Amino acid sequence: MPRIRGVRVRGWALLAVLTLLTAACGGETTPAAGERPTTTDASEQPTTSTAPSGAVETSGSTTSAPEPSTPGGGECTVTITGDREEVWTFEQAITSFSTDYWLSEEDLRSTVEFLGEEITGGSYEEITGRGEPIITFLQISCSDPDNLIQGALVLPTNATRATDLPMGPGTYPISGGLFDADGEVRTMIADVSVNEDEVYGTAPGSGSLEITRWDLDGIVGSFSFAAREAFVDDPQDIEVMVQFSFVCREWFSGC
């Protein structure tokens, strides 16, 4: 399976392809009445679903999404403290959030067919049978849609399977950065980027992702971690906090 910066192509290249496919189709694919993504049994879970084994269930499972400032959409905010202090707020864009759970089976199958089994790692049945994502179970990118270099990212490790990360509230440790994609199951990897001239590495085990609500209408939560500047003699140490509230927009076909 090809990888990019230690992350499976499925989590990055397929997301880019999906973005292009969605834009080309205008995001108008509509599932049949009552249809839900079939890559997981998440649709059968009650709204107060429990976190997976190894994760801590939060008490805010019925938390409502705050009203976003952008009508019809969501937003996120990155707060950086420490040796550098910045606050960025971005409106929800097609690059902000990705999940198989918000896509129809038809679109997921089409993605496998479009890219081919050599790239995706098997047929639709083989991939889902192994409990792996077609694209990703979850990828949050709180970044400037006009300058994707500026922002913070979180996504699961390669070992994480559907049963480890169901749609619902839960808390997951951040085990490292993007080069730690082969880390422990049920953990996340995270990254922050300020500009083209500064590179930061995520401190292992320094944070967590907390999801207080995640259903077919939206996802609400936060993630935080520590990072240190790399490749310099006097590195800056920073703390990164991201708060997000995204809704299932028109480019998702499964909700």
Image (cartoon, rainbow, N blue to C red):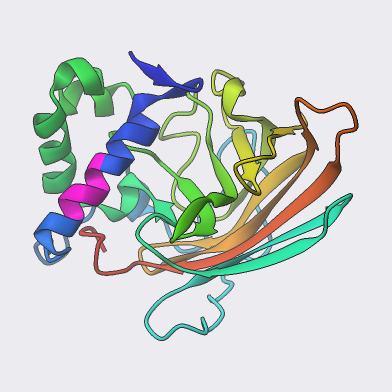
Q: On the image, which quarter does residue 211 sit in?
A: bottom right
Decide which of 23, 32 is in the foreground and name it: 23
Q: Is residue 22 visible?
A: yes
Question: Which quarter of the image is occupied by the C terminus?
Answer: bottom left
Q: Tell me if residue 241 comes above or below residue 175 in the rendering.
A: below
The residue under the point 49% across, 28% down is 160
Q: Tell me if residue 18 comes above or below residue 89 in the rendering.
A: above
Q: Position of residue 114 (x, y in %)?
A: 10, 33
Verify whether residue 19 appears in magenta. yes
The residue under the point 56% across, 80% down is 66
The residue under the point 28% across, 34% down is 134
Q: Tell me if residue 14 comes above or below residue 65 in the rendering.
A: above
Q: Is residue 174 left or right of residue 220?
A: right
Q: Position of residue 72 (x, y in %)?
A: 37, 82
The residue under the point 10% across, 58% down is 25
Q: On the image, which quarter does residue 145 sit in?
A: bottom left
How many numbered marks have been drawn onto this rendered protein structure? Answer: 0
The magenta stretch is 17-22
Q: Position of residue 92 (x, y in %)?
A: 44, 67
Q: Is residue 121 left or right of residue 60?
A: left
Question: Which quarter of the image is occupied by the N terminus?
Answer: top left
Query: Taken as a whole, is the magenta stretch helix, strand or loop?
Result: helix
Q: Is residue 103 left or right of residue 117?
A: right
Q: Is residue 132 visible?
A: no
Decide which of 103, 16 is in the foreground and name it: 16
Verify whether residue 234 appears in magenta. no
Q: Position of residue 129 (x, y in %)?
A: 26, 24
Decide which of 146, 243 is in the foreground and name it: 146
